[in-house]
Amino acid sequence: MRYVHILCLIFGMEFLTLPAVHADTAAVSTESAASERFFLEVEKCVSRGEEIVLLPQGPECQPYKKGGPYLDGMRRSPNADSKSGAMLGDTHRIDPDEVCGSMRDQRVLGRHTIKDIVSRTAGKVDATGIRIIGDIFCDGLDLIGLDLPYSLVLDKLLIRQDV
């Protein structure tokens, strides 16, 4: 089995070692009404200089530098994951197979979602940049070709395949 090692802090990520497994996932895409609500919420957050905290039920805006502590302090709902006592922000305790197999977990983003966010928020991003906390990429993450005039922070994330 191939392993993916990630050390990022594209200005702030954790180190993860996860098996690279191919799976069809319910990633956020630009085709659905749910994803339209997702992108509208993201746009609202970044235009106000807030962080985007991803929860199983969807994104939530939190003040600058408060998203990580907010996520760490939230208790997972009993049906969100088999490890119901774990904290949402503890990516080392998330079962990638369970989360990536869920059709309802809105923390799961498609490999091109960051590029979609950058494209959809062009000219609207506050000086603090785009800060996303708690994202899960089951099909990898594609950042190739991004040239940003602001910072991109992906923190407390899980990436199951290639970057």
Image (cartoon, rainbow, N blue to C red):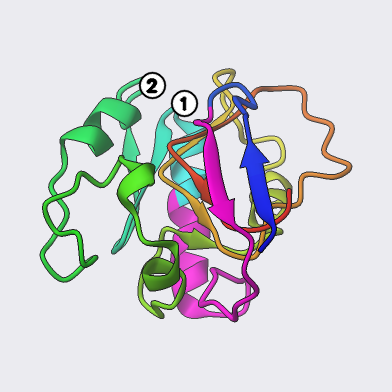
Please state which of residues 15 and 113 is positioned toward the viewer in this rendering. 15
Q: Residue furthest right?
A: 145
Q: Please give the residue where the numbered disc 1 appears in the rendered image.
A: 49
Q: Secondary structure at mark 1?
A: loop
Please state which of residues 91 and 108 is positioned toward the viewer in this rendering. 91
Instruction: Report x, y in % for residue 109.
Output: 55, 61
In the rendered view, would you say 113 is above or below 12? below
Q: Residue placed at 62% from the left, 36% from the top?
A: 124
* Residue 18 is a magenta residue: yes
How far apart are the alpha carbons under marks 1 and 2?
A: 7 Å
- Please provide the residue range marked out in magenta: 13-41
* Residue 116 is a magenta residue: no
Q: Residue placed at 41% from the left, 44% from the top?
A: 134
77 sits to left or right of 70: left
Q: Residue placed at 56% from the left, 25% from the top?
A: 126
In the rendered view, would you say 41 is above or below 52? below
Of mark 1 and mark 2, the one earlier in the sequence is: 1
Q: Secondary structure at mark 2?
A: loop
Which kind of residue does numbered mark 2 sit on?
Tyr
**Tags 1 and 2 in contact by the CB under 8 Å rule?**
yes
Q: Residues within 10 Å of mark 2 (few under 14, many from 20)?
A: some
In the rendered view, would you say 1 is above or below 162? below
Image depth: mark 1 or mark 2 in front? 2
Which kind of residue does numbered mark 1 sit on?
Gly
Q: Residues within 10 Å of mark 1 (few under 14, many from 20)?
A: many
Rendering quarter of residue 64: top left
163 sits to left or right of 129: right
Q: Residue placed at 71% from the left, 41% from the top?
A: 122
71 sits to left or right of 77: right
Q: Please give the residue where the numbered disc 2 appears in the rendered image.
A: 64
Instruction: Report x, y in % for residue 97.
Output: 44, 70
